[in-house]
Structures are given as structure tokens and as C-alpha cells.
Image: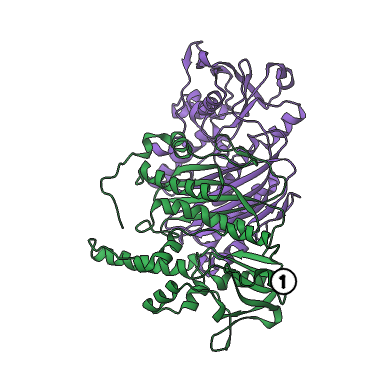
Chain colours: A green, B purple
Amino acid sequence: MIEDKNQARTDLSDLGEFGLIDHLTKNFKINHSSTIKGIGDDAAVLKFNNKIVITTDLLIEGVHFDLSYVPLKHLGYKAVIVNLSDVYAMNAKATQITVSIAVSNRFPLEALEALYEGIETAAKIYDIDVIGGDTTSSTTGLLISVTAIGETENEVYRSEAKPNDLLVVTGDLGGAYMGLQVLEREKEVYKVNPNNQPDLEAYTYIIERQLKPEARKDIIKLLKDLNVKPSAMIDISDGLSSEIMHICKQSNVGCDLYEEKIPLDPQVISTCEEFNIDSTTVALNGGEDYELLFTIAQEDYPKIKANPNFSIIGHIKELTEGLHLITRANTKIPLKAQGWKNFNA
Amino acid sequence: MIEDKNQARTDLSDLGEFGLIDHLTKNFKINHSSTIKGIGDDAAVLKFNNKIVITTDLLIEGVHFDLSYVPLKHLGYKAVIVNLSDVYAMNAKATQITVSIAVSNRFPLEALEALYEGIETAAKIYDIDVIGGDTTSSTTGLLISVTAIGETENEVYRSEAKPNDLLVVTGDLGGAYMGLQVLEREKEVYKVNPNNQPDLEAYTYIIERQLKPEARKDIIKLLKDLNVKPSAMIDISDGLSSEIMHICKQSNVGCDLYEEKIPLDPQVISTCEEFNIDSTTVALNGGEDYELLFTIAQEDYPKIKANPNFSIIGHIKELTEGLHLITRANTKIPLKAQGWKNFNA
């Protein structure tokens, strides 16, 4: 919404494909001993002593992001984060990424520099080597494909949750979704009156959750320090409900989820009231919070109790008992996932 | 150009994102012991004893392919091949890939099934495990992002060519480019007269080079059997000239390339004559042949001479001597790369 009309504009065609890659990646440093060769050959070369995990995600303009309110630097940052989150969800340490982008000629070089600045910032903060990628033109918008690699001694799957395990979530939920609602509303206001200066002070936290999410690298370290190995783990990209259902389906178990235990930030609650949306629905189906959801054995409870990073929100049951939400009014209703269904657009 | 108007058409929205991934990947088998966990969790889990290589490529509709003459099955096959080619160019054995696609709602499920059939065929033939990916919607066309992983004991870079090394290329060059010219011409004919039945008999080889390229897995095995380790290697995706320049630049060397030694298939020569294009220009700048270009020490010459897989096309010189093409008329002209400049469109 804030656009500098006088910004510099260098056409991508002035550099050519190889010149462009060289220019955009010139600041990337290699830090990990597992990176033998980064950018610059037919492939990167890596060497690991442990098992590795690998995951990939596409982010597409008009589907996953709207450049009318997502700054390119934030987009680059977020594209890295969503992939790192999957690595951490395996109980792995993220070490490398590749980044491929496709852009139409409507993007000047300066736009890609901003995008790569975000990628570089995420790589620095999360200590990741950027080891490769592809840069090409697209016929329409912007597209980012990131592949992330991590190292693990002790991977955690979605499929090993056991009856009586506790269901635990990190941080708080629904913020990213409500941040998106605020941004969408401001976009509509801007269309009507481009001179309106939005006051977003009251929404700082939730807008940041949407535009600059973080991946829970800290939790992987914390669980190790606490000597807790989750039985199952997943990251929350599509909403709590959908992720619980993945764990239950793949582990062949049921669960009880307690509505009153779902962690919500006060800003999420107040914004939900303002928008007249039920905050539990937002937490269950909102998505993009990139928190971790995991299950632990009952005997590990003393290790995590009273830790502000964790909320115990329910427990695993036998498959035959089904998947339920226990409401604040103490009624038991079947858990449903609405999630983000891109293909239902 | 050949379209069945009565084909079945199932909307992607009928399956939803998770249903779609499950459906498309249900036939994929895991064969490699290095694949501990494939599709179905936050990330795949792998374990290697050797070094690994990793490479990624984007293929975008309207930029890299034209669905008016590229069957989706062939496209799926080719998307895998272009990535495997980069793995082989590192002197590695390709073992796994991830495949991400973005499609607009104009594609029915049956189109994606054809695409995945091509991916599955390539995976079977090249003995590759498909271990993950992402499937999402796009606002316009089709996009495929593949990441390939391979294992190597003895990687070969672009940067280790030495003066006096021999410059060697596999197979023959220019076929893929001339196949594209024929397909583009037939597309124009079809626009004018959709009932015209093209006779492509005379172009079978070059059309196959364009639509169904192969990666030179066999060469990596052959070099090992012959006990030849190239000093430098690259795959030919952008044209011979551009690839030679990459090796020379990264190795800090010059070279002499002999025009008369460049391997051309008779069908490339005859089609070049028909189109009134110089066949050397096509071989130098055509691209997409996915042959391997490498350098070997002079002492390895006896091991590869008279082998029909290899053509010795020149030799490496000191950097100060420059990069030259020695023409059939025995004149020496500086080597230039025109290549494929996507951003110059």
C-alpha cells in the first residue's frame, strides 16, 4: 500500500539469466561444514553424517500472497520460513535451502533485490546456507519455490502418536489469519480512498504474524534440552484442526481437544470480536501460524508443564473413540477441518 | 495438436489438495535404501553414506513449453530428465526427486494424471524414488518445479579443466532445437488449417530429442567402467557454446573447439538445410540436448578413443590464448554464446 513512485527501475533483461543469479546471490555465505559446494555448478554438493530431511513448497502470486500489501522483502523471508517450519516439524536442524523464482518482466531488478534481501535475512537469522536455485521468467506473476534440507539424529513423524499421549501446541494460534483479515480490509479501504493513512497500531502483532512469521527453531533446541522426544509432530500451516486430523489419521488414533486450552493472543481475541468472527474457529482453521503441534507421553508431562512456550490442549484417544472438540460449554462435537482449500477457489 | 474432444474431465476441486496428492502419487514406489521416508510427512527422510548432490529446475508454461504440441505425459517425463541430467553432470547417481506443480482450474484431473504418468515413467526408467512435493493452484498456467538428489563418491565440478585436457561431448547436438523448429512450424500450419495431417516421419529423431529427451545416466556408468574421471563436466542444456564458456570461465582456461568435430545427426543436417539454418550455429546455441560435455587428461585418451558414445571436439588451452572455434575453413574465430536468454524476450 505504501509505494515509492520514484524508485529505481532496472530491467531484468539488462543482466541476462546468469548475470541475474550472480547479482542476487553474491552476498550469500556458506557456514555449514555439510555444504561442500553451494551455488555455481550443475548441482550443490553436501555431506552429512546423520539422516537428512528434505521438503519443498511453492508460493504463488494471487494464490498464496497479494503483493498489494505484502512487501517483497517480507515475502522472501516468509518463503524461507514456511519451508524451515517443515524441517523443524521433523525434529531436524535446518541447514540448507535452494530458492527458485519465476518473474515476469513487470518486476524490475530492484524488486528481486528486495525479495532476495528477505531470503538472505532469513538465512542469516536461521543459520541456513543458500546452495542453489533457478531464476527464470514467467508469463504473468511471481512464483517462489524453496526446497529446505535439514539434519537429524532422531526424526519425528506424524504417525507415532499413542492413546493417552498429551497433545501440545507452541505459541498462540489464529494471529496470522486475523492479520490477513485486517490487511484485506485495509486493501478495500485503500481502493476507495488511496489517500487514507491506515492506523494499524492495534494490529501490530497479528499483522507481523501474517507478514513476517517465524519458524520454531527454538522449540527443537528446547525439546532437546528438556530431553523430550515427541511421539508425533507436525507444523501448523493449515490450521490446528487439519493438523490434528493428520496426526490422528496417520497414527490411527482419536483425540479430545479442549476449546478452553487453545492459546489465543489478546489481540486475536479483540480483533475477532471486532470482525465478529469466533476466535476458536479462527484458531482451528486459520492456518499460517507456523507453530508446532506435537504429542508426548504422559510421563514427559513434568518436563514441559508451566513452560510458557507450551500449551497442553488435549490428549490422544483410541481411534474408535473418534476426534472431538470439547467446548467451553462442555459439549463434545466432532472435529472438522476446513483449512485452506486452494482448489476450492 | 492431436486432441481428444471426448476425453473425461474431472474438476480438481472434486478432490481437494490432499486428495489430489494422494491420488497422483499412489503408484510411486520406494526402491532405494537411502529413502527412509518418502511422501506423507512434513518432509522426506534420507540417509546417505556418501556425499550427495542436489539441484532444482523450474519449467513454466509459455516460457519452457507450449502445451499446443507438448503432450503432458512427455512434459512430466522431461521435467524429471532435465534435473537428472544435472545430477549426472556432477558424476553422481540420481536417487530421489521431489516434484511440485501449480495448475490452474482449466486443467482437469485427467491432465494431471497424464503429467504424473510421465513423471512415474521417468522415475521407473532411471530408478528414482519420488519422495515429496507440493501441489497447488495457479492463477494462470502450469508450472513444474523438480528437485533432484543424487549420491556420489567422486563429484566432478566445472572448475577443474586444465590446459591440454581434451574436450569431449556425448551423443550428437542440435537435435532438440531442430525438433522444436519443426513443431513450431507445424503449429503455424495447424492454425491455418486444423484439418491438415502433418507427416512428421522425416523428423522422428529430432522431435523425440525435443519432446522426450534422455539424461546420460549410461555415461556415468561407462566412465566408471572405463576408469575415466573427467576433470570438469557440465550438461548441455543451453547449447554447446554456452557450456564450454562455463567450464572455461570457472576453470580459468581457454580452448580450441573444432567445427568439423561437432557431432551432428544426419536428420539435424538435412533439417537445417531445409530450414536454411547453419547446423554449427544450431549445435553451438540450440540447447536442450542434455548430452554431457567434459574434459579429460590426455593420458585418458586411449580409454575413450573409438568409443561411439564420445566425440573429441577440441582441447583446453591457457586462459591467455582465449576461447576459439576453428572453422572447417581453418579460420579461428572467438567463441560466443547466444544460448537461451529467457529474460531477453
Q: Secondary structure at mark 1?
A: loop
Residue B2 appears in view:
no
As drawn, B118 above or below A66: above
Residue A15 appears in view: yes
The disc labelled 1 sits on which kind of residue?
Ala
User: Which chain is home to disc 1?
Assistant: A
Q: Which residue is mark 1?
A: A297
Does residue B93 sit above or below A55 in this rendering?
A: above
The residue positioned 68% from the left and 27% from the top of the image is B309
> Residue B261's x, y, as percent?
59, 19
Q: Residues within 10 Å of mark 1 (few under 14, many from 20)?
A: some
The residue drawn where x is 42% and y is 65% is: A205
Which of the image's four quarters has the C terminus of chain A? bottom left
Q: Position of residue B237 (x, y in %)?
A: 54, 35
Q: Is residue A271 left or right of residue A294?
A: left
Say if B289 sits above or below B259 in the image.
below
How many dots with numbers? 1
* Left or right side of A256 for A174: left
